[in-house]
C-alpha cells in the first residue's frame, strides 16, 4: 500500500511503501537507522541485517543523505519516538542518489544556511516552522469566515502610499509611476463600504533599510477592515483573532512545537482579553524603568517595546499614539486632538509589534487636510476621499504581520526563518 508518513498510523502491523528522502542515517554491522522524510513528516526506518536480503542491507548502509527512494516496511508503534511510529524496513528502491549534500548534520553559519535556503527548507526545524505558518494561515481563513468576513484581494501595483512615501518600491507602469503595495488598507476601506466586514491576505513591500530580527523587505499581511466598527470594536476583533490562531497552533501543531523546543506554557496563556496601556502611560512606565531619554512624541524602539511587553504575560495594546507619529488616515481622539484612535499590539518575549491598527478618518474635509499636511498628491487619493463623500461611516481595521507572528509562535529568534524565501537587506538569493 502506497502512503505517506503522516498517514502511517492507519497501517500499524501492515506493509506500506513511501516515497521519501534520507534526512540522516547511522548504521553498524548489524543494523541501520534511516531518518526518512517525505514532506508530510519524519519517521525512523530500521533495517536489520538478519531480516532483509543482503543487497537491501548494503543499500541501506551506503545510501547518502538526501538521496530519494521508495522504501517499504511494516509500520510499528514506537513509544520512544515523538511521532509515535517507526518502519521495519523490508525493501529499498533508490530513485536518485544525492552526492555531497552541502547541509550536513553538523553546525553551519547563518549566511551559509541562507545561501542554501532552497535546501535548508528540508530540515526538521524549517519544516516545523512552515507547518506552523500554514496553520496560522488556515486558522485565519477559518476565523474570519466564521465571523462573517469576506476575503477581498487588494492590488499589488498601486499609485498610493498608505504608510508614508519614504519606503516605497518604485517601478514603471508603462508611462506612469507605480509602487509595490506597502499595505492593502486603503483598498480594503473601499471594500468594507461594499461588503461590510472584509479581510485580505497578501504580500507587502517596504524598502526599509532596517537590518533587525523583525524586519523583512517583503512580508505578508492579514488586513481586516470593518464598517461601523469603532476603536474599541477593533481591539475586540484583534484579541479574539490572535487568541484563535494561538489556540489553533497549540491544538494542531503540537509535534512541530515540540520539535522546535517551544515553551508552550507561555502560549497557553494567550486568551482574550489583552491588557491595554495608553501611549502616555507607556512613557511614564518607561521613565520608571529607567529609560530617561525617551520623551513624549518619540516613537518606541525595540528595547522600549520589549520592556513594556515584559510587564505582561499576554500581548499588550499600546493605544492613543501622538498624531505626529502615525499615518495620515487615523481618526483623532474626540477629546484630544494630539492623539489618534490607534493601537499597536506588542507580542510577548521581545517579538515586538505584530499588529498596527486604527479607527479611520471618516470626515472628507479632515481627510483632505491631512493629505495636504503629509504632502500627498490629491489626485492619487481622489477615490479614497470619495469613500467619505458618499455615505461615509465610522470604520476601523488593522494589519497583522504574518512573519513576526510565526516567529513568535514558533519561538525562532529571527523573521528570516518564518518565510520560505526571505527578502532581506542585501539578500535576493535564492
Ligand atoms: O504597522 P503597519 O505599518 O500598519 C499598516 O500597514 C496598516 N496599514 C495596517 C492596517 O491597518 N491595515 O504594519 C502592520 C504590521 C506590523 O505590526 C508588523 O507586524 C508588520 O506589519 N510589519 C512588518 N513585518 C516584517 N517586516 C517589516 N518590515 C514589517 N513592517 C511591518
Ligand atoms: Mg506599525
Image: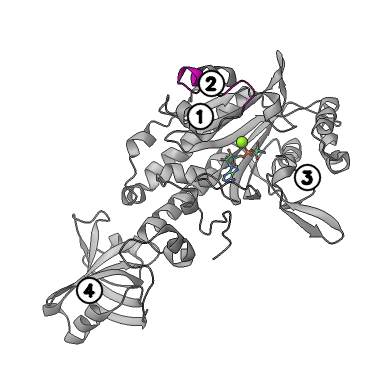
Q: Position of residue 319 (x, y in %)?
A: 59, 23
Mark 4 vs 2: CB contact within 8 A: no
Q: Which of pointers 1 and 3 indicates the residue nearer the eye?
A: 1
Name the quarter where the N terminus is drawn: bottom left
Mark 1 vs 2: CB contact within 8 A: yes
Q: CA distance from mark 4 to mark 2?
A: 60 Å
* Relative vertical location of residue 223 with respect to residue 304 in this rendering, above or below: below
Residue 289: name its quadrant: top left
Q: CA distance from mark 3 to mark 4?
A: 59 Å
Q: Which mark is residue 420?
A: none
Q: Residue at x 35, y 47 (%)?
A: 257
Q: Within 8 Å of ligand 1, the CB of disc 3?
A: no
Tell me which segment is drawn in magenta.
285-298
- Considering only order in the chain, which callout, 2 or 1, is on the residue closer to the N terminus? 2
Q: Residue at x 79, y 34 (%)?
A: 374
What is the crowding at mark 2: few (fewer than 14 residues within 10 Å), some, or many (at least 20)? many
Q: Residue at x 30, y 75 (%)?
A: 71
Q: Mark 4 — residue?
A: 89
Name the quarter where the C terminus is drawn: bottom right
- Considering only order in the chain, which callout, 3 or 1, is on the residue closer to the N terminus? 3
Mark 3 vs 4: CB contact within 8 A: no
Amino acid at each position: 500500500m502506497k502512503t505517506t508518513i503522516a498517514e502511517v498510523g492507519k497501517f500499524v502491523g501492515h506493509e506500506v511503501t513511501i516515497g521519501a528522502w534520507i534526512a540522516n542515517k547511522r548504521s553498524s554491522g548489524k543494523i541501520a537507522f534511516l531518518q526518512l522524510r517525505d514532506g508530510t513528516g519524519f519517521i525512523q526506518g530500521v533495517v536489520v541485517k538478519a531480516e532483509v536480503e543482503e543487497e537491501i542491507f548494503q543499500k541501506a548502509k551506503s545510501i547518502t543523505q538526501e538521496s530519494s527512494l521508495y522504501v517499504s516496511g511494516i509500520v510499528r508503534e514506537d513509544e520512544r519516538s515523538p511521532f509515535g511510529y517507526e518502519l521495519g524496513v523490508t525493501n529499498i528502491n533508490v530513485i536518485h542518489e544525492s552526492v555531497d549534500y552541502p547541509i550536513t548534520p553538523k553546525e553551519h553559519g547563518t549566511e551559509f544556511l541562507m545561501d542554501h535556503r532552497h535546501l535548508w527548507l528540508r530540515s526538521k526545524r524549517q519544516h516545523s516552522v512552515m507547518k506552523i505558518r500554514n496553520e496560522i494561515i488556515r486558522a485565519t481563513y477559518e476565523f474570519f469566515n466564521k465571523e462573517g468576513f469576506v476575503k477581498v484581494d487588494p492590488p499589488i501595483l498601486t499609485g498610493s502610499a498608505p504608510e508614508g512615501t519614504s519606503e516605497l518600491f518604485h517601478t514603471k507602469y508603462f508611462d506612469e509611476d507605480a509602487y509595490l503595495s506597502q499595505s492593502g488598507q486603503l483598498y480594503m476601506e473601499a471594500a468594507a463600504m461594499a461588503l461590510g466586514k472584509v479581510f485580505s491576505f497578501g504580500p507587502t513591500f517596504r524598502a526599509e533599510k532596517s537590518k533587525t530580527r523583525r524586519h523583512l523587505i517583503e512580508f505578508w499581511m492579514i488586513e481586516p477592515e470593518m464598517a461601523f466598527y469603532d476603536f474599541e470594536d477593533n481591539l475586540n476583533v484583534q484579541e479574539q483573532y490572535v487568541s484563535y490562531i494561538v489556540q489553533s497552533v497549540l491544538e494542531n501543531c503540537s509535534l512541530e512545537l515540540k520539535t522546535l523546543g517551544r515553551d508552550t506554557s507561555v502560549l497557553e496563556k494567550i486568551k482574550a482579553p489583552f491588557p491595554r496601556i495608553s501611549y502616555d502611560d507607556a512613557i511614564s512606565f518607561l521613565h520608571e524603568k529607567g529609560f530617561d531619554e525617551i520623551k513624549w512624541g518619540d516613537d518606541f524602539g525595540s528595547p522600549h517595546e520589549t520592556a513594556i511587553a515584559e510587564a505582561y504575560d499576554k500581548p499588550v495594546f499600546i493605544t492613543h499614539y501622538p498624531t505626529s507619529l502615525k499615518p495620515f488616515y487615523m481618526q483623532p481622539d474626540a477629546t484630544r486632538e494630539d492623539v489618534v484612535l490607534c493601537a499597536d499590539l506588542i507580542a510577548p518575549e521581545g517579538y515586538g509589534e505584530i499588529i498596527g491598527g486604527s479607527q479611520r478618518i471618516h470626515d472628507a474635509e479632515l481627510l483632505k487636510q491631512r493629505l495636504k499636511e503629509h504632502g500627498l498628491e490629491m489626485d492619487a487619493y481622489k477615490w479614497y476621499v470619495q469613500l467619505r463623500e458618499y455615505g461615509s461611516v465610522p470604520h476601523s481595521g488593522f494589519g497583522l504581520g504574518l512573519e513576526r507572528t510565526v516567529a513568535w509562535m514558533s519561538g525562532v529568534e529571527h523573521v528570516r526563518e518564518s518565510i520560505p524565501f526571505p527578502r532581506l537587506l542585501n539578500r535576493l538569493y535564492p
